[in-house]
Amino acid sequence: FCDPRRPATYVRGVGNRRRWEFMLMPGDDPQQLITPHSIWALLAPWLSPDDASIERQALYTFHAAIARRWRRDRLLIAGDAAHQTPPFMGQGMCAGIRDAANLAWKLAAVLKGGETSDLLDTYESERLPHVRVFVETAVRLGHIIQATDEQAVRDRDERMSANPSYFATPNPPLGKGAHQAGKWGGRLSQQPLMAGERRFDDLVGYRFSLVHDVTLDPPKPPRWNGDARFVRADEEALSQMLGALGTRAALIRPDRYIAGTADSADELAQLMACYAPNAVRTG
């Protein structure tokens, strides 16, 4: 709610839970503002004590920050230690989960799979430019929501009314790293829903997976020594997935980003040898 008198946010949660955020304004007593009396006064436009109970109240300050380095030898940082995002997109924890998903398979590849520790350098090079998009977008949205100068608010409203725009959550590619250069390498893969209401994640788990055309029989690269899944695109959902990529095979990393694509057996053998440490044929 872009009210210059006190910008606010209302979020529907699970079940009957609701969350409100109110901006502290000049002259506010922060401790007084979180007393039940003050909270119900802020909530009055939506509900009263007869409608709900207060489960939690807190004061917090948010930041937009990205650490200069995410790795030093055997020490790596992730989540809020690596970056902090304003709350206007709800992407702070999401970014931390993406960090963990990116880093976990690389740590396993180094500790158990014989990969060199250089692979860990791709964690920062991939994730930092990706998370920067979300941090900068959240900051931009914050400038819109938090405007309190009345003239600036009138200008904002006139500008946005004259030129309506629709917001789409960013879907940036990863930065340079353990994926093929090109159109699809480093892009998030799809989550097909297959027969029996099975999702792709349920089928392959947290491991490398190769989705390939039924006419393309992938070789077993000698380098693979883990537990990758080979998935023939013999279901419509998987066939459509390859069709959307315009390719005959897609190698998908455990964190569900595309390592690369291939259109021939030779291309596929090269792709798997370069971008899929820790994997073997299991089906």
Image (cartoon, rainbow, N blue to C red):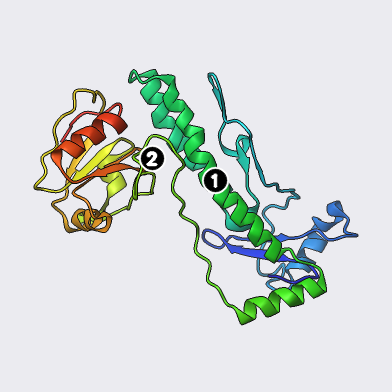
Please state which of residues 1 and 271 is positioned toward the viewer in this rendering.
271
> As displayed, is residue 212 above or below residue 120?
below
Occupied quadrant, residue 93: top right
> As displayed, is residue 251 above or below residue 76?
below
In the image, residue 249 lies at what x, y percent? 21, 45
> Tag on residue 257?
none
Q: Could you say whether the residue bearing mark 1 is in a helix, strand or loop?
A: helix
Q: Residue at x 62, y 81 (%)?
A: 162
Name the residue carrying label 2: 255
Name the residue carrying label 1: 131
Occupied quadrant, residue 36: bottom right
For the residues marked 1 and 2, what is the alpha-carbon distance in whole angstroms? 15 Å
In the image, residue 276 lies at what x, y percent? 29, 31
View extreme (right): residue: 27
Identify which amino acid the numbered label 1 is placed on: Val
- Whichever of labels 1 and 2 marks the residue nearer the N terminus, that label is 1
In the image, residue 149 lies at what x, y percent? 82, 69
Q: Could you say whether the residue bearing mark 2 is in a helix, strand or loop?
A: loop
Identify which amino acid the numbered label 2 is placed on: Asp
Neighbours of disc 1 within 10 Å: few (<14), some (14-19), many (20+): many
In the image, residue 28 lies at what x, y percent? 87, 59
Please state which of residues 13 and 186 is positioned toward the viewer in this rendering.
186
Q: Quadrant of the N terminus?
A: bottom right
> As displayed, is residue 201 above or below residue 23?
above
Q: Quadrant of the C terminus?
A: top left
Tally of marks: 2
Q: Residue at x 91, y 60 (%)?
A: 27
Q: Nearer the viewer, mark 1 or mark 2?
A: 1
Q: Residue at x 59, y 56 (%)?
A: 137
Q: Residue at x 57, y 54 (%)?
A: 90
The answer, for residue 282, to whether it is visible in the render is yes
The answer, for residue 228, to whether it is visible in the render is no
